[in-house]
């Protein structure tokens, strides 16, 4: 066979995504040993593996090509941007520039997607500079990718600036702006963009509706969620598994069990995300037992594989039920299935063990974790305090400071009760100083913990000072101060009562002693008289 025959066969495999046949052709090319280094053959092999998401095979073949064309660089960057590792997409882009290859307008959206996935702000801004340099700011696809990048990285001002500068906005561009606002819980901004979209005569598609629902759920805007549901039914989107899953998640977070259960029961196809959304909804409805039953049904039927998100929800259900045995079983399932223990799932395991009263398991798993973040430390510190291990909590807090991980308000709210339990006023004062330096001393939860700590350490005057300086107070603030004052008043009353009781006993004993003395004297006198 000539190299052209191999190329024709590979092109057919690329179009049909026939990976198995493509591998057989690759083996035949290796055995032939005539066309293995042919430039066009290697290009098509790279394209085939990249399109079939076989990124490692694609990279091996790509690295054998001495001077890849720009289209092949784009294919590889796209494959990494969609499948990961996302860092490789950015590294390959830099290698492309270093090799003297000029990117095309198709290169930038792929690199920006990788940057948004990694929250790589500086890399994304560098790409934006390259776009400006090559005067491609008018390209709708590049601008849409820039809007998506800035929005996902939290820079909604820049996202809006790029969006407003676009001359032509298609539905994808509008969806990127809507999704960015929704992602950060900006309900009013999200609705404002939707209204502007309708005024621009752009009809929402299924992706638009999926993008709106998280903001609706976070704002607990049930009536608006029902209106979107009605729109989905009218437009025939209600059979779309992605939209139905989004609606289910929204009803779960809005605690509308009737509608959420109805959607789940009537769905024809349920994927992994659907099951996870329903399990999460059960937790929102206060039904952890229902969440466990759903998980067992999903597990027994074997219809879908549980994801780290699903396992995280089930572990929270075990924590709410304080069912340590079930929690350990789920942990075993995670290990047996080889489920990737990401940071979020690891933190949930720590929290589950702590809430179920097994601090030793929580600390043991915490110590085994390679990567730890603020949430990891906060979870294990809170667990130690809740289970009466205040000294252990302070030790872990010191480890946290030495490791360079910055405590947040949740960490400080967790550590201050440890100071209360140990009456460790000096540690409490240091924590208070940290809150002031890092601008956390005005947060209500932190102030509540400070009031409780100072009062229990005997400094009710400082507790009242913290209370008086608070701009906002909640019911916990008042309860903390009242309870601590009441406790101190009770202790004072008990002390007074104890002193009075002691005096009464002393007086009684003195009277008894005096009485006994008088009796003895009279007996002595009597005996003398008898004599």
Image (cartoon, rainbow, N blue to C red):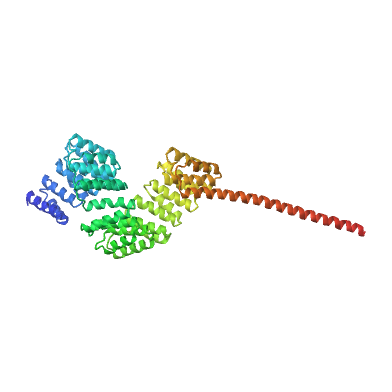
The answer to whether residue 29 is seen in the rendering is: yes
In the depicted view, which residue is nearer to us: 287 or 337? Answer: 287
Residue at the extreme top: 133
Q: Is residue 446 above or below residue 281?
A: above
Where is residue 389 drawn, in percent x and y?
A: 49, 51
The answer to whether residue 307 is seen in the rendering is: no
Does 330 sit left or right of 103 as displayed?
A: right
Where is residue 210 drawn, in percent x and y?
A: 26, 53
Q: Is residue 122 above or below residue 366?
A: above
The number of discs equals 0
Does 393 sit left or right of 330 as displayed?
A: right
Q: Residue at x 48, y 54 (%)?
A: 387
Where is residue 352 drawn, in percent x and y?
A: 41, 55
Residue at the extreme right: 531
Quadrant location of the C terminus in the rendered image: bottom right
Where is residue 271 drawn, in percent x and y?
A: 26, 59
């Amino acid at each position: 066979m000539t190299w052209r025959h191999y190329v024709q066969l590979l092109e057919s495999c690329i179009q049909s995504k026939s990976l198995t046949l493509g591998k057989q052709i690759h083996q035949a090319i290796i055995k032939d040993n005539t066309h293995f280094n042919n430039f066009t053959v290697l290009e098509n092999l790279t394209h085939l593996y990249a399109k079939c998401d076989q990124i490692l095979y694609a990279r091996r073949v790509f690295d054998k090509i001495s001077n890849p064309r720009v289209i092949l660089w784009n294919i590889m960057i796209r494959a990494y941007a969609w499948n990961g590792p996302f860092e490789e997409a950015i590294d390959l882009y830099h290698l492309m520039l270093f090799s003297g290859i000029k990117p095309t307008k198709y290169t930038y959206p792929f690199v920006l997607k990788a940057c948004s996935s990694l929250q790589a702000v500086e890399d994304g801004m560098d790409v934006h500079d390259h776009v400006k340099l090559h005067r491609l700011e008018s390209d709708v696809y590049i601008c849409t990718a820039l809007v998506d990048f800035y929005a996902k990285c939290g820079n909604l001002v820049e996202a809006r600036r790029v969006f407003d500068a676009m001359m032509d906005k298609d539905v994808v561009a509008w969806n990127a702006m809507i999704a960015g606002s929704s992602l950060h819980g900006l309900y009013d901004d999200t609705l404002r963009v939707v209204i502007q979209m309708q005024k621009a005569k752009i009809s929402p598609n299924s992706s638009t509706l999926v993008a709106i629902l998280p903001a609706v759920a976070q704002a607990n805007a049930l009536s608006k969620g029902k209106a979107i549901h009605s729109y989905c039914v009218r437009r025939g989107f209600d059979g779309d598994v992605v939209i139905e899953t989004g609606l289910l998640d929204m009803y779960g977070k809005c605690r509308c069990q009737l509608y959420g259960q109805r959607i789940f029961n009537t769905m024809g196809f349920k994927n992994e995300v659907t099951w996870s959304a329903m399990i999460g909804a059960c937790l929102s409805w206060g039904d952890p037992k229902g969440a466990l039953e759903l998980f067992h049904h999903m597990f027994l039927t074997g219809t879908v594989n549980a994801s780290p998100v699903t396992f995280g929800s089930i572990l929270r259900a075990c924590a709410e039920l304080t069912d340590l045995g079930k929690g350990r079983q789920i942990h075993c399932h995670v290990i047996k299935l080889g489920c990737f223990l990401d940071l979020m799932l690891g933190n949930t395991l720590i929290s589950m063990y702590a809430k179920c009263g097994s601090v030793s398991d929580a600390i043991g798993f915490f110590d085994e974790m390679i990567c730890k973040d603020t949430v990891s430390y906060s979870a294990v510190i809170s667990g130690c305090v809740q289970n009466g291990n205040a000294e252990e909590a302070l030790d872990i807090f010191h480890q946290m400071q030495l490791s360079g991980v910055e405590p947040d308000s949740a960490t400080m709210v967790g550590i201050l009760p440890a100071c209360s339990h140990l009456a460790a006023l000096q540690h409490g004062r240091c924590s208070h100083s940290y809150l002031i330096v890092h601008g956390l001393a005005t947060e209500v939860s932190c102030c509540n913990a400070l009031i409780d700590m100072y009062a229990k350490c005997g400094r009710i005057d400082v507790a009242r000072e913290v209370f008086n300086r608070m701009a906002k107070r909640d019911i916990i603030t008042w309860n903390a101060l009242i309870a601590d004052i009441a406790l101190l008043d009770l202790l004072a009353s008990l002390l007074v009562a104890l002193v009075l009781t002691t005096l009464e006993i002393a007086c009684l004993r003195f009277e008894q002693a005096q009485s006994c003395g008088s009796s003895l004297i009279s007996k002595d006198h009597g005996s003398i008289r008898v004599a």
